[in-house]
Image (cartoon, rainbow, N blue to C red):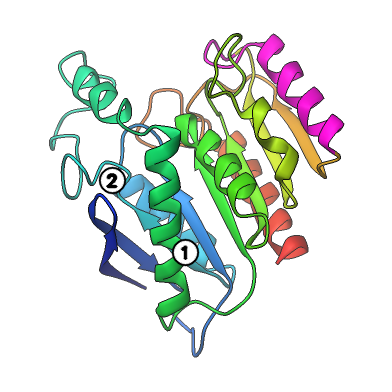
Amino acid sequence: MSRDIDIPAADGTIDAHVFTPGNADGPLPAVVLFTDIGGLRPCYHEKAQQIADNGYAVLMPNIYYRDARGPVVPEGKSFRDPDVRPTLFGYAGRLTPEALSRDFAALLKCIDSEAEFADGKLGVVGYCMTGAFALRMAAEHPERVAAAAGFHSANLAKADDPNSLVHVVGTIEARVYLGHADKDELLPPEQIACLDEALAKAGVHYTTELYKGAAHGFTAKDAPSYDATADALHHKRLAMLLEEAL
């Protein structure tokens, strides 16, 4: 089951969706799901519902609400198309750490006020570029976030990046799971090692797993890199993380 919701935020109104199991009869632990760079679309609605069916209330915001409402990829097009990608990269460029901080505050306020969400700690998951969003939200709100996960994440620890996550993970108290695509050009081995080192030094309870043979975007059913076996494993690992942490 799902419903649309508008969330007041410092930079505008976030259009979002709330997903719950069909048999829900009360508030459930909250999970925030950030889409990949392609934004809201059917395969992410399906993903959010699958997570919700395990016993959670899932909040999926439009990360691009500052520029567009609803799906940002035109029907019949792909976020990989050369005439679509520049628009998405332009939208993504506005998602600075400062902008994200304001969005996190709005999402938490929504969770605190809507009936579907239970009191207590929550989980957050991101894909592609938003794997970093999940970790950043956990770092900024350690008192709220108990579980943070990222799958086929991108650019988590670029060298000489002043906004790199390696500078903020020290405050994370959540359990962290990172499922990486094998030989992902957007997250080379040196970045994985750098972030792992930062998490270990900070004493974060984390797990890093390499999905052997899977390409970047392996959970997105509308992508040519979709890998059904790796996607199933991603759901299994995420379910385990959420069950143990929440």
Q: Which residue is mark 1?
A: 108
Q: Residue at x 19, y 50 (%)?
A: 70
- Which disc is residue 41 wearing? 2
Q: Residue at x 36, y 34 (%)?
A: 95
| Amino acid type, label 2 | Arg
Q: Residue at x 66, y 28 (%)?
A: 167
Q: Quadrant of the C terminus?
A: bottom right
Q: Quadrant of residue 194?
A: top right
Q: Is residue 244 left or right of residue 137?
A: right
Closer to the chain start, of discs 2 and 1, is 2
Residue 223 or residue 33, whichever sits in front: 33
Above or below residue 7? Residue 160 is above
Dot 2: few (<14), some (14–19), or many (≥20) neighbours within 10 Å?
A: some
Residue furthest to the bottom in view is 25
Q: Quadrant of the N terminus?
A: bottom left
Queried whether the magenta region covers residue 193, the answer comes back as yes
Any part of residue 108 in sight: yes
Q: Which residues are magenta?
A: 184-202
Could you tell me how many numbered marks the image carries? 2
Does dot 2 land on a helix, a strand or a loop? loop
